[in-house]
């Protein structure tokens, strides 16, 4: 079977399947990165707010993470091509 004329990098799989696989892999890798960042930021907050901080520190952490995610989401939305 000669695929010299086929520009597709994966001639055996439809582009739709390849795109879905890439999307799922990137989602999984993003989750791993997010968990690593979560642990790093949590340890930072533990240093800033000693264990006595308790509930207030947890809410501050949740607000901080939410604000960061909203900012990143807005920036990513700007990169998305307009239809």
Image: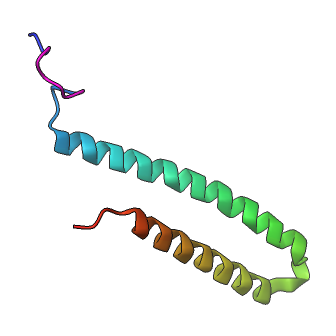
Residue at 27% over, 48% down = 20
Give coordinates of residue 83: x percent, y percent. Answer: 21, 67
Q: Give the colouring mode of the picture.
A: rainbow
Residue at 91%, 77% in the rendered image: 50
Above or below residue 66? Residue 27 is: above
Decide if residue 34 is on the left or right side of residue 40: left
Seen from the viewer's position, the closer of residues 9 and 79 is 79
Task: Name above or below for residue 42 compared with residue 8.
Answer: below
Farthest residue to the top: give it.
Answer: 1
The picture quadrant where one finds residue 82 is bottom left
* Residue 39 vs residue 23, the one in the foreground: 23
Q: How many marks?
A: 0
In the picture provided, is 14 more to the left or to the right than 19? left
Q: What residue appears at the point 74 percent right and 59 percent down from the top-left corner? A: 40
The part of the chain drawn in magenta is: 4-9
Query: How far across and down, in percent of the image, does residue 57 sit?
Result: 78, 83
Which of 54 and 28 lies nearest the eye of the viewer? 28
Q: Main secondary structure of the magenta part?
A: loop
Residue 29 lies left or right of residue 18; in this view the side is: right
**x, y percent for residue 37:** 67, 59
Between 17 and 70, the one lying in front of the other is 70
Q: Quadrant of the N terminus?
A: top left
8 within the magenta span = yes
Q: Position of residue 38 (x, y in %)?
A: 66, 63
């Amino acid at each position: 079977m000669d695929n010299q004329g086929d520009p597709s990098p994966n001639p055996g799989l439809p582009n739709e399947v390849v795109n879905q696989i890439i999307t799922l892999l990137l989602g999984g890798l993003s989750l791993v990165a997010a968990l690593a960042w979560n642990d790093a930021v949590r340890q930072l907050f533990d240093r800033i707010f000693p264990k006595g901080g308790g509930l207030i520190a947890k809410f501050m952490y949740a607000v901080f993470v939410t604000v960061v995610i909203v900012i990143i989401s807005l920036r990513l939305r700007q990169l998305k091509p307009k239809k």
